[in-house]
């Protein structure tokens, strides 16, 4: 009898590379104060193509990326060596399970070079914990194993339940607040070593 393992990957990670490149293009465009229309014009692309690329649903050719790099006045490798540590919070909701088969989900990738620390944070019900800002560029990944917690940068907290993942820039004030039940949270800190 042959064992069958069914592996499912969460839909939001279908094309991690395209998502990360799209984020990098948008970040670099915004850093330069360019509108999407202006960057599309400078790179000789349609606004729809640029919008799809920045949204992570595009499938750009090397020529397209090279045109964008020239329009943004940066090396092509700056777009290709995209990381997931841009200064935004990303919430990955838990997915349902039927319990009858093995399921694996890629929740996020932490790209280097970073120093990584894994922590377990256990909080009683109805408690609050203020996180001190970490070194510049640090990204904090929270996976809620049990319970419910409101967490993230103090200006943009997210409500999380068991199975949810949140990652956010941790070089700003942040906090964790539990509800009426205790919470068990797995924390990964990714701190740049450069």
Image: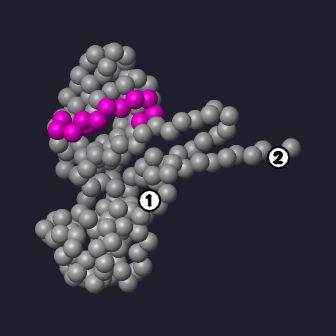
Residue 2 tag number: 2
- Who's the residue at 82% across and 46% down the image? 2
Q: With 147 as the anchor, is 44 left or right in this view?
A: left
**On the image, numbered disc 1 is attached to which residue?**
16
Q: Is residue 4 above or below residue 86?
A: above
Q: Secondary structure at mark 1?
A: helix
Q: Is residue 166 above or below residue 99?
A: below
Q: Position of residue 40 (x, y in %)?
A: 25, 77
Residue located farthest toward the left when viewing the structure as drawn: 33
Residue 185 tag number: none
- Of residues 173 and 50, the one nearer the viewer is 50
- Who's the residue at 28% across and 16% down the image? 126
Q: Quadrant of residue 43?
A: bottom left
Please report whichever mark, 1 or 2, sits nearer to the chain's N-terminal start: 2
- Who's the residue at 30% across and 80% down the image? 45
Q: Position of residue 5 (x, y in %)?
A: 70, 46
- Who's the residue at 42% across and 79% down the image? 61
Mark 2 crowd level (few <14, some 14–19, many ≥20, 10 Å Cα): few
Mark 1 crowd level (few <14, some 14–19, many ≥20, 10 Å Cα): some
Q: Is residue 42 above or below residue 92?
A: below
Q: Is residue 85 above or below residue 182?
A: below
Q: How is the image coloured?
A: one colour
Q: Report the span colored magenta.
A: 152-164
Does residue 119 appear anywhere in the picture? no
Magenta span has 82?
A: no
Magenta span has 160?
A: yes
Does residue 110 appear anywhere in the picture? yes
Q: Secondary structure at mark 2?
A: loop
């Amino acid at each position: 009898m042959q064992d069958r393992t069914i592996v499912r990957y969460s839909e939001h990670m279908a094309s991690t590379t395209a998502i990360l490149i799209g984020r990098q293009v948008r970040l670099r465009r915004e850093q330069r104060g360019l509108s999407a229309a202006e960057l599309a014009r400078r790179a000789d692309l349609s606004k729809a193509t640029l919008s799809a690329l920045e949204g992570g649903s595009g499938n750009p050719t090397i020529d397209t990326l090279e045109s964008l790099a020239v329009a943004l006045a940066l090396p092509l490798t700056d777009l290709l060596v995209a990381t997931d540590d841009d200064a935004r919070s990303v919430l990955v909701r838990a997915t349902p399970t039927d319990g009858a088969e093995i399921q694996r989900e890629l929740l996020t990738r932490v790209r280097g070079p970073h120093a990584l620390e894994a922590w377990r944070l256990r909080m009683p019900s109805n408690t609050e914990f203020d996180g001190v800002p970490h070194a510049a560029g640090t990204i904090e990944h929270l996976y809620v194993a049990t319970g419910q917690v409101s967490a993230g940068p103090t200006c943009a907290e997210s409500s999380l339940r068991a199975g949810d993942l949140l990652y956010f820039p941790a070089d700003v004030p942040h906090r964790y607040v539990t509800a009426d039940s205790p919470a068990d949270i797995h924390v990964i800190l990714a701190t740049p070593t450069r």
